[in-house]
């Protein structure tokens, strides 16, 4: 057990803040030094600069030929089924998920009828 | 029949004499009510509920008479040992380290100075506490509330003024939860609209090498310079190494989830258990709570004002508002900087820039605590 070095708050503040600043300034210099000597820095830069490999040309299968007039007919029928004051908000292709489609169908039935 | 009634009466008398009801004082009742109010704040107002709720419940438990918590070995005494022998705060720090990303600070190390400047609040409160009649050791513990770092506050208080532990812990955690209310007015007062509109450049990428070297280097430097806080800083950086190494994911996961949660329960409950009426119900508690607020406001103002100096020194690169994040409270103080900037300059994003001084503040508070221990421990 020993007596405190000082009980003057101003001296405590000055000494303490000097040490806090000195430690953090010292650490910031060390961080800068580490950044300068970092052996992995170049590798990372190279990786960044290297262009991403071009994807091998993938032949996208052509979408099955659909008569555009058929789409228009389907949309028109849907609007007509809804009623006169219908407003088209979005047109999305129906997914193949069975449950979702059943839900959608039920929803449409509930709304229309 | 008469014999039965006598036996019944004696037994009843004995049960009453052994019960807490016969020995409860008005002070105990007030502290139980304080515990209930803290529970309300934790659950209804969501003020740091993870910490405040076990503290509040510990406070309620501490004020039941005749429990023998301090007389014989039991779970409550064991929890108390975890605080008394400074086991819990360093373990909490390990979890904090595992959750902390030092990347923004490493990317822009100049902002570490803001983490140092915000420690001025600690010493403003220290001076205020000494003027109000606290001893220098008590004043240092009260001042460290301004560091907005619960484990460091508890660590320092246990070493220098254990009788103030309850009041200091409650003040520290309460103000940490009030950072979004305390800081903005001070930040606005210390900056102009033009300051708030300063856009800071995007931070550079930090390599894995830098992320791993930093915790090792800083542990060596700080522990050699300030051995009293070697356990705090060492555990903080060990947790961070688990996170950054990339090969200790399981350890990192345990440190930042299960372990920190378990130890938080014990630390907070143990802190609440120190809040018995005899040591908590006095005018010093009110003074501590007021001085804690002074420390927070002083730290925030010092951070922002030093940010103004850095703005000038860097030719307008630094937005002074990130200076307020220098009080530790990770990451809430950085978020507050972002919220204030967004309010006055929508589209200006400096959350990551504010994280630099924010995590530097954790180191700064630990260093301030270590220096105080070295200078003042009686």
Image (cartoon, grey):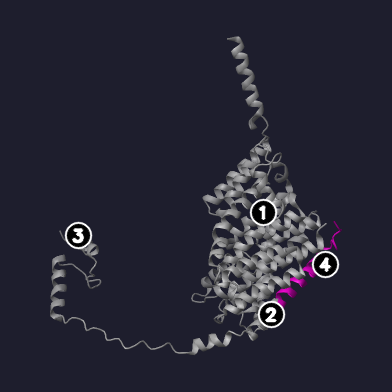
Residue numbers of the magenta segment: A1-26
Query: Dot 1 lies on which element?
Result: helix
Q: Which mark is in front, 3 or 4?
A: 3
Helix, strand or loop at mark 4: helix
Could one spot residue B177 in this view of the protein?
yes
Q: Do the residues bearing badges 4 and 1 touch, measured as CB atoms within 8 Å?
A: no
Q: Are marks 2 and 3 in contact (CB under 8 Å)?
A: no
**Rendering quarter of residue B199:** bottom right
Tell me where residue A91 sits by quadrant.
bottom left
Q: Which residue is denoted by mark 2 in the rendering? A: A30
Q: Which mark is residue A106?
A: 3
Q: Position of residue B75 (x, y in %)?
A: 64, 44
Q: Is residue B327 visible?
A: no
Question: Quick one: SS at disc 2?
Answer: helix
Numbered circle sitting on residue B169:
1
Q: Position of residue B122 (x, y in %)?
A: 72, 63
**Residue in the image at 58% along x and 66% along y:** B98
Asked if marks 2 and 4 fall on the same chain, the answer is yes
Tell whether B102 sits left or right of A74: right
Q: Nearer the viewer, mark 4 or mark 1?
A: 1
């Amino acid at each position: 057990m020993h007596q405190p070095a000082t009980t003057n708050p101003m001296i405590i503040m000055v000494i303490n803040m000097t040490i806090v600043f000195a430690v953090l300034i010292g650490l910031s210099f060390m961080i800068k030094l580490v950044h300068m000597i970092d052996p992995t820095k170049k590798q990372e830069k190279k990786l960044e600069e290297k262009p991403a490999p071009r994807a091998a040309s993938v032949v996208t299968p052509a979408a099955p030929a659909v008569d555009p007039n058929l789409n228009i007919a389907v949309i028109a029928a849907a609007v007509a089924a809804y009623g006169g004051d219908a407003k088209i908000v979005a047109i999305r292709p129906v997914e193949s998920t069975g449950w979702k489609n059943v839900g959608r169908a039920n929803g449409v039935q509930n709304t229309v009828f | 029949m008469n014999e039965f009634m006598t036996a019944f009466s004696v037994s009843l008398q004995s049960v009453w004499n052994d019960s807490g009801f016969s020995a409860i004082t008005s002070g105990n009742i007030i502290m139980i009510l304080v515990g209930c109010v803290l529970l309300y704040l934790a659950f209804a107002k969501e003020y740091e509920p993870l910490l405040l709720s076990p503290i509040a419940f510990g406070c309620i438990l501490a004020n039941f008479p005749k429990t023998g918590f301090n007389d014989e070995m039991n779970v409550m005494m064991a929890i108390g040992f975890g605080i008394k022998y400074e086991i819990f705060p360093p373990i909490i720090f390990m979890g904090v380290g595992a959750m902390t990303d030092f990347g923004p600070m490493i990317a822009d190390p100049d902002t570490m100075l803001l983490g140092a400047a915000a420690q001025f609040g600690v010493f403003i409160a220290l001076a205020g506490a000494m003027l109000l009649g606290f001893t220098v050791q008590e004043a240092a513990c009260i001042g460290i509330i301004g560091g907005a770092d619960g484990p460091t506050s508890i660590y320092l208080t246990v070493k220098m003024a254990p009788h103030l532990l309850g009041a200091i812990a409650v003040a520290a955690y309460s103000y940490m939860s009030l950072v979004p209310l305390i800081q903005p007015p001070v930040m606005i007062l210390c900056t102009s609209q033009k300051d708030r509109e300063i856009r800071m450049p995007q931070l550079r990428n930090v390599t894995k090498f830098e992320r791993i070297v930093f915790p090792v280097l800083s542990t060596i430097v700080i522990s050699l310079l300030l051995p009293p806080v070697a356990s705090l800083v060492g555990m903080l950086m060990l947790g961070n190494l688990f996170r950054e190494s990339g090969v200790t994911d399981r350890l990192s996961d345990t440190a930042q989830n299960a372990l920190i949660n378990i130890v938080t329960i014990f630390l907070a409950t143990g802190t609440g258990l120190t809040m018995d009426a005899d040591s908590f119900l006095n005018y010093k508690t009110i003074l501590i709570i007021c001085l804690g607020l002074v420390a927070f406001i002083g730290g925030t103002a010092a951070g922002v004002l030093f940010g103004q100096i850095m703005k000038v020194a860097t030719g307008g690169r630094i937005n002074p508002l990130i200076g307020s994040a220098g009080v530790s409270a990770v990451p809430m103080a950085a978020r507050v900087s972002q919220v204030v900037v967004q309010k006055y300059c929508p589209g200006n994003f400096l959350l990551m820039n504010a994280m630099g001084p924010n995590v530097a503040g954790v180191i700064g508070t630990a260093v301030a605590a270590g220096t105080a221990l070295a200078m003042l421990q009686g």
